[in-house]
């Protein structure tokens, strides 16, 4: 027997790692922090292509997509993720990224639509706060 | 008809995703979609995959979906993972085991959090499955949360229930206990390449011989889901189960049982909502304090609440 339903809208987040680096500690830490903040976090694992990320975002109807990358291929891969999302009509999600991303690349990524880029040493609570503040209600 | 529903009916996957969110959130709009789409459901073969955490449910689910794709079927997957009882957050990780399906347009995977439901599923899972059914998937695989002994709700949602077992997880008395094993239409021994697989198969066989005469004996199949071994035979067994249900007339009986169960479950939650809405917080707090202090028992407290809303005392 199902218990009482919770009818409140949940924030759904996709945390994904594009590209070939297999270091997903950071992605997992962020996923866990968002989970502990009461969000429903879909984690897809490592080595995701831009198509896979966009398709997962579509099927799961997430409100937020967070990408983690440490390989240095962000300028290569992130535009393709954005393009694949657009191709599928997923144009209203909050996008953010984290990992090893040089400061000079940040403006380019923001121009692409990434609302924020979080570097190493970021307090996870800042990411939680960021999502709550910017997610579309 | 609204634009979203129109796109849904044209087969737009984005529209499906959006409708599912509203249905999952149990909003009024979501209920409207269920109302509109329910008459179109009932065609898909709904298959429940259950078993303990780590038994390989997601891998079996992914492998089965791939097998049905090879057979030309469209496959929907609903994968449920637990919500935190403290923060209501959830980490939904079932897609990790389904990477091969990620870009197949004939497969649609939706992760759901259990959102406080206790039976191994999620509060809106029946509605979500009905909506996916109405979208036109031939097979819908429903993966439960890691289920221990008593998470039997899946049997009321799926036509065919598959219980995934592993070697080395307990003696035969574990399997003799009542509960989840009784709802299995098909028993799978996954990770069949591990030591102990033969022992588990014979234990399960021995257990089934204890069933009363005439009782249906679920087939036992061995799989190694990571390599796909045994998966085609499992898909065959699942299809054979549905055929058997149709032949025997059991399908109709099962559908009626499920409908009855769902109606009563909904009625229960409506009543609970009504009681909650009608009870002033301080009144509830006062009852809580009296029960916590052992001045009042919980049954009497609940009857007081309920009779205040329903108008009549439950006990004359």
Image (cartoon, coloured by chain):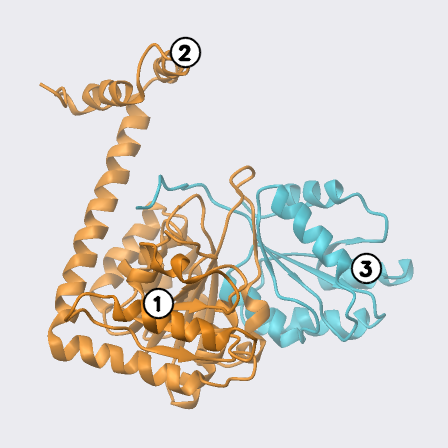
Chain colours: A cyan, B orange
Label disc, if present, on residue A99 of the rendered structure: 3
Look at the picture and state if B310 lies above or below A99. Answer: above
The residue that appears at 52% across and 73% down in the rendered structure is: B196
Mark 2 = which residue?
B293
In percent of width and height, residue B158 lies at 30, 65
The residue that appears at 57% across and 42% down in the rendered structure is: A38
Q: Which one is nearer the viewer's eye here, A70 or B60?
A: B60
Q: How far apart are marks 3 and 1 (CA)?
A: 37 Å
Q: Which one is nearer the viewer's eye here, B222 or B208?
A: B208
For mark 2, name the chain.
Answer: B
Q: Residues within 10 Å of mark 2 (few under 14, many from 20)?
A: few
Residue B9 seen in this snapshot: no
Q: Distance between the residues labelled 1 and 2?
A: 48 Å
Question: Could you tell whether A121 is left or right of B118 in the image?
Answer: right
Name of the residue lying farthest toward the left: B316
In percent of width and height, residue B72 lies at 38, 89
In percent of width and height, residue B299 lies at 26, 23
The residue that appears at 61% across and 74% down in the rendered structure is: A52
Which marked residue is nearer to the observer: mark 2 or mark 3? Answer: 2
Q: Residues within 10 Å of mark 1 (few under 14, many from 20)?
A: many
Label disc, if present, on residue B132 of the rendered structure: 1
Residue B224 seen in this snapshot: yes
For mark 1, name the chain.
Answer: B
Secondary-structure class at tag 1: helix
Q: Which of marks 1 and 2 is nearer the N terminus?
A: 1
Look at the picture and state if B240 lies above or below B20. Answer: below
Question: Could you tell whether A26 is left or right of B154 in the image?
Answer: right
Q: Are marks 2 and 3 in contact (CB under 8 Å)?
A: no
Which marked residue is nearer to the observer: mark 1 or mark 2? Answer: 2
Label disc, if present, on residue A25 of the rendered structure: none
In percent of width and height, residue B56 lies at 52, 69
Same-chain status of marks 2 and 3: no
């Amino acid at each position: 027997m199902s218990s009482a339903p919770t009818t409140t809208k949940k924030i759904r987040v996709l945390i994904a790692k594009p590209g070939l680096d297999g270091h997903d500690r950071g992605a997992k830490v962020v996923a866990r922090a968002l989970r502990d903040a009461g969000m429903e976090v879909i984690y897809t694992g490592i080595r995701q292509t831009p198509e896979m990320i966009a398709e997962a975002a579509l099927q799961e109807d997430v409100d937020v997509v967070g990408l983690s990358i440490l390989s240095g291929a962000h300028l290569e891969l992130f535009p393709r993720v954005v393009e694949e999302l657009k191709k599928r009509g997923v144009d209203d999600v909050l996008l953010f990224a984290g990992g090893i991303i040089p400061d000079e690349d940040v403006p380019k990524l923001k121009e692409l639509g990434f609302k924020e880029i979080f570097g190493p040493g970021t307090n996870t609570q800042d990411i939680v706060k960021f999502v709550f503040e910017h997610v579309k209600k | 008809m609204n634009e979203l529903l129109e796109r849904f009916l044209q087969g737009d996957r984005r529209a499906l995703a959006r409708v599912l969110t509203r249905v999952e959130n149990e909003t009024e709009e979501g209920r409207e979609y269920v109302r509109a789409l329910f008459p179109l459901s009932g065609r898909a073969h709904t298959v429940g995959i259950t078993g303990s955490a780590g038994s390989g449910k997601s891998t079996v689910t992914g492998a089965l979906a791939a097998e049905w794709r090879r057979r030309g079927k469209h496959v929907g997957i609903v994968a449920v993972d637990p919500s935190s009882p403290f923060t209501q957050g959830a980490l939904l990780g079932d897609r990790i085991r389904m990477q091969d399906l990620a870009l197949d347009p004939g497969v649609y995977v939706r992760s759901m959090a259990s959102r406080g439901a206790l039976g191994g599923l999620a509060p809106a899972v029946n509605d979500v499955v009905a909506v996916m059914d109405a979208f036109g998937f031939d097979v819908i695989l429903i993966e439960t949360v890691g289920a221990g002994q008593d998470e039997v709700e899946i049997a009321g949602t799926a036509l065919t229930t598959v219980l995934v077992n592993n070697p080395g997880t307990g003696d035969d008395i574990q399997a003799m206990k009542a509960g989840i094993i009784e709802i299995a239409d098909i028993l799978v021994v996954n990770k069949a390449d591990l030591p102990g697989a033969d022992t588990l198969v014979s234990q399960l066989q021995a257990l089934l011989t204890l069933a009363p005469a005439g009782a249906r004996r679920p087939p036992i199949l061995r799989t190694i889901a990571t390599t796909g071994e045994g998966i085609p035979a499992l898909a065959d067994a699942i299809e054979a189960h549905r055929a058997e249900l149709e032949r025997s007339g059991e399908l109709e009986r099962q559908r009626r049982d499920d409908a009855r169960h769902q109606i009563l479950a909904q009625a229960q939650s409506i009543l609970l909502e009504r009681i909650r809405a009608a009870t002033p917080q301080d009144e509830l707090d006062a009852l809580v304090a009296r029960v916590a202090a052992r001045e009042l028992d919980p049954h009497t407290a609940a009857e007081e609440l309920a009779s205040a809303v329903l108008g009549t005392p439950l006990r004359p």
